[in-house]
Image (spheres, grey):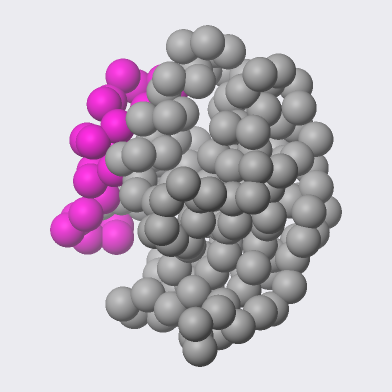
Amino acid sequence: MTWRRQHTQGTPSTLLRTFRDGSVLAFGAGRFDSWCVYLTRPDRATYPPKDVDYFTQLRSLAERYGAERLYADFLAIYHRTTKEVSPHVLEMIYHMAKAYGADDLEVDILLSILYAGMVAEENKRRAKLRKRVKRLGVHQVLFEDLNPAEAATFSKGKPWDVIELECAVRGF
């Protein structure tokens, strides 16, 4: 497991993780800042994971392992997320994922993407809700029976104070 600053294709990026199958998770330049999360899979070109895709994966895993278990693991990561990437949190995710047996790699990558997304949210300029936006989406998918596509777009275009109220009603 590695975490370091590296240069790829002339564009600076921050390598977060290299997974056992050769997949790589990194931050790089996006449309608005340098906190865009990118995943490179051995059989696929580099791409930014979409909320709908990892929310779909989260729902599928919840059917196998239980929403409460996945949410508890997510919250352990959420409560440790700051503006800085922590090698300790990445290590915790790696060990946490081992408890998912044959799905450990899938869970490792998924939770690492969610963690990177929350770090990115914490670093967004003028963002008022920060990582709570991800928590809202995860909660909606796991406990509110919102389909992943709806959860992925739930906050888009809404004023921050409306989303703040949605978070407050849920206790976060």
Query: 132 above or below 8?
Result: above
Q: Residue 149 magenta-drawn?
A: yes
What's the residue at 57%, 65% (across, down)?
26
Q: Quadrant of the N terminus?
A: bottom right
Percent of width and height locating residue 60: 43, 20
Estimate the x, y position of residue 135 in percent, counting from the top left. Answer: 47, 42
Residue 95: tell me if it is visible: yes
Up-down: is 80 above or below 120?
above
Q: Is 144 inside the magenta-drawn segment?
A: yes
Tell me the residue at 57%/18% (across/down).
68
Q: Count the marks: how many?
A: 0
Q: Is residue 78 visible?
A: no
Q: Quadrant of residue 129?
A: bottom left
> Residue 35 location in percent, x, y?
48, 72
Q: Which residue range is magenta in the image?
A: 141-161
Nearer to me, 15 or 123: 15
Residue drawn at the location 39% of the way across and 35% of the way down = 55
Q: Nearer the viewer, residue 90 or 109?
A: 109
Q: Position of residue 61 (x, y in %)?
A: 50, 20
